[in-house]
Image (cartoon, rainbow, N blue to C red):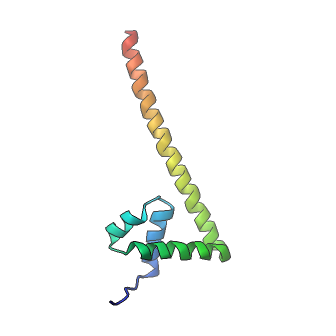
Amino acid sequence: MKKRRYEPEFKNKILRLHLEEGRTLTSLAKEYGVNKASISNWVKSYREECKTNPTRKEEHDYFKENLKLRKQLEELEKENGFLKKAAAFFAKEID
């Protein structure tokens, strides 16, 4: 079986979707037709490169922070939606 080669830009796109947006390896593999093990190897190589390349390390830290903030925003949006529903409910009860 011939080993498939992927362009660096494509690999970087997959890495960004995983690291910055929190996409799972399985979902990326299905969506882009790439072996899950290949993506896992790219992530491992990227993390190794972060140890020696300050630019990559800074990029990785940015991805992690962005993912953390996305998750916080999602949680706050859920809480806000709940509070709006509760406020509407109690406003009806007062009338």
Q: Nearer the viewer, residue 73 or 52?
A: 52
Residue at 58%, 72% in the rendered image: 47
The image quarter in which residue 28 lies: bottom left
Tell me: residue 5, above or below residue 60. below
Tell me: residue 3, above or below residue 78. below
Residue at 54%, 73% in the rendered image: 44
Residue furthest to the bottom in view is 2
- On the rendered image, what quadrant is the C terminus found in? top left
The image quarter in which residue 36 lies: bottom left
Tell me: residue 49, above or below residue 64. below
- On the rendered image, what quadrant is the N terminus found in? bottom left
Q: Nearer the viewer, residue 13 or 43?
A: 43
Image-based side of 4 in relation to 48, left or right: left
Q: Position of residue 9 (x, y in %)?
A: 45, 77
The image quarter in which residue 39 lies: bottom left
Q: Say how many tags the image has.
A: 0
Q: Position of residue 79 (x, y in %)?
A: 47, 35
Q: Position of residue 65 (x, y in %)?
A: 58, 56
Tell me: residue 77, above or below residue 61. above
Residue at 59%, 67% in the rendered image: 59
Residue at 40%, 85% in the rendered image: 5
